[in-house]
Amino acid sequence: MRITAFADRLLHELEGLDWPAGIKLLQRNWIGKSEGAVIDFKIDKHEQKIRVFTTRPDTLYGGTFLVLAPEHPLIDLIVTEEQWPAIREYREKTARKSELERAELTKEKTGVFTGAHAINPANEQKIPIWIADYVLLGYGTGAIGGVPAHDERDLEFAKKFDLPIVEVVQPLSNEPALGFVGEGIAINSPIIDGLTTAKAKKKITKWLEERGKGKGAINYKLRDWLFSRQRYWGEPFPIFWENGRHHSLSESELPLVPPELEDYKPTGTGEPPLAKAKDWIRYSNKATRETNTMPQWAGSCWYYLRFCDPANESRFVGEEAERYWMGGKQAGGVDLYVGGTEHAVLHLLYARFWHKVLFDLGHVSKPEPFQRLVNQGIILGEDNRKMSKRWGNVIDPLDVIAEYGADAFRCYEMFMGPLEQMKPWSMKGVEGLSRFLARVWRLLMDENQAGEWQLSPRVQDVAPEKSQRKTLHATIKKVTEDIESLSFNTAISQMMVFVNAFINAPSVPVSAIRTFLILLSPFAPHIASELWEKMREKFTVTPADLTDQSWPEHDEGLLVEDEVEIIVQVNGKVRDRFRAPLGANEEELKATALGLPKMRELLAGKQIAKVVVVPNKLVNLVTN
RNA sequence: GCUCACGUGGCGGAACUGGCAGACGCGUACGGCUCAGGACCGUAUGGGGCAACCCGUGGAGGUUCGAGUCCUCUCGUGAGCACCA
């Protein structure tokens, strides 16, 4: 699949998304856009040219050799008789190396001279052509112009094989020019001498273009996507082959369902397992079905669209449903996508690509699939290591749910710490949350003589006291805001504060408890609705169901105290405190602070150099 | 090697634009209730000191009346990338 055709859009349209900066960076690096030029080098005594990609066309005069990737197709053509044995040996050795070995950075540079030469288009000089495994066939053109003076790898290579080194960039600082890879002033380069790197790049690229020797070019690390697998599991392609040409099935033949296979293991012949389904692959007397299947990414690229309209029989998603769920003001459709960092590049890039294709075809209303992305941290085992069978530290949610219930499990997961952070599991922690929920239960339930739970007589239809009202509204505010910011741990803390404040009160106002249960319900839905029902047996309410209640709103006015505590500091250290009416002015606060007995004692014999007053907060007395 | 993130009690973690460090939970100690408790309730709990006080957010500097929070350097942990021309 030609994902590279979308490289630039995949890069630029990241901008408008609310994604973690780290993930955006990973995607940018993965796409790996580099701007530069391609330059054609004539091969001495041959018709062919070797094309190289460079981000530094301004260093062309410093190009003293060419290096081809060992797999480069032109090698067969240019190698001289006497160099063939060495070249052949080197290529075989390279072919045996794994990707990892080849990427081994610490190893010394290796390579072999081909015996052939190329002509540097800038100065018409003959330069040797080498092959080396530090040049990769898959990136750029698979060939580079070696500029040893201004590229670390080329320098290492030139030193090892005693190739000439020509300095062509003068650093602006006092650094030595040899080995300088930054931007400077062009030297020893007649066409561009004296120009800054940026200008030199432009001028020499234009110069090359005018002579048909090269042109400006952009290269991406991103490769096209090999979208087929030789295995049974995976969506079959709706394609058949006839006379060596492929055709798509007609829409009436969709969906295409894979055949049932007894044995879906690999064939061992290089044919995909689907080839075993002899009847299935025979599409007609003349045509056979495609036997490759799609990779697992296929489904993950559009499942979120199907979720918008899962029962639709005629279309992958109905137009109206798509507009409703995926529309909106912002670039992306899904409002919030919570997932792991392991999907930073593959899944999230592939899905963006598919979505853009569908967008271009007019099937979806937004160019991006996921507006806001949050990476949840992974949960470690109790020993602080990644959960794994190897360590025997795996926690099975079903076991936890069986023992403590789904509410305690959910709440503990949320209470553990910030969503995005990696954190260790703790059974003691689950017990703590289980105790909290038990306290919620006992907040409004009593056990009678027969050992049955019933609504406590403490729950009464009375108005909350002032302090209770304040706690209630502080809880509404905190829980509401914390849900918005996904700070579930602190939302639960606040609900614990609420319960602690009410559990020993002689009477528990129904109105406060109702509000509390609404706040609790997204966290612990089972116990919240159970308690709601118990309350409803005695205190009716409309609408009746917990899930039909509107979300409470807090009253800021109830949170403000008429009196505040002012801390008194001496040189920034807290020494005393007093209460003052809210809004007391600076002069009053200063005077009160200075009049405190403790302050008089502490400041005796000292000069006050400065007094800092922060209204409603503190007075800081600075002595010299 | 490069890039990014993160370092706060015995543990998980709180702390809005710089303004009482340690909310909440776990653990621990003591007490109560109990035939019993790995249940429940209460009290205490950063370190040192009899105390007044002193010290404390990985370490060292700096800015500021005041720094967990801002700046510089440094150490550690984790994740990602890894000859990308």
Image: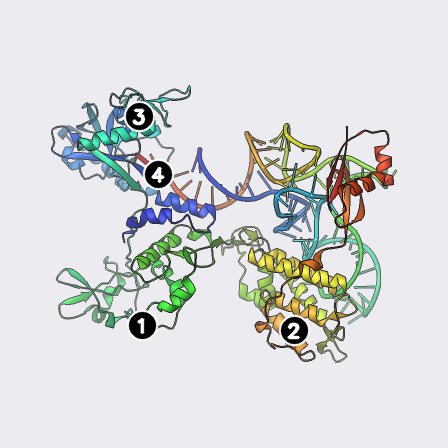
Q: Are marks 3 and 1 in contact (CB under 8 Å)?
A: no
Which one is nearer the viewer's eye here, B40 or A309? Answer: A309
First in sequence: mark 2 vs mark 4: 4
Residue drawn at point x = 19 percent, y = 27 percent: A121
Which kind of residue does numbered mark 1 sit on?
A: Ser
Q: Residues within 10 Å of mark 4 (few under 14, many from 20)?
A: few
Mark toward the viewer: 3 or 4: 3
To which residue does mark 2 refer? A531
Q: Are marks 1 and 2 in contact (CB under 8 Å)?
A: no
Mark toward the viewer: 2 or 3: 2
Which kind of residue does numbered mark 3 sit on?
A: Pro
Q: Are marks 1 and 2 on the same chain?
A: yes
* Picture coordinates of residue A56, whole percent (x, y): 30, 31
Task: Name the image quarter holding the N terminus of chain A.
Answer: bottom left
First in sequence: mark 1 vs mark 2: 1
Which kind of residue does numbered mark 4 sit on?
A: Ala
Q: Which mark is residue A148?
A: 3
Mark toward the viewer: 2 or 4: 2
Mark toward the viewer: 1 or 4: 1
Q: Residues within 10 Å of mark 3 (few under 14, many from 20)?
A: many
Which one is nearer the viewer's eye here, A489 or A413? Answer: A489
To which residue does mark 1 refer? A314
Left or right for B22, reference A283: right
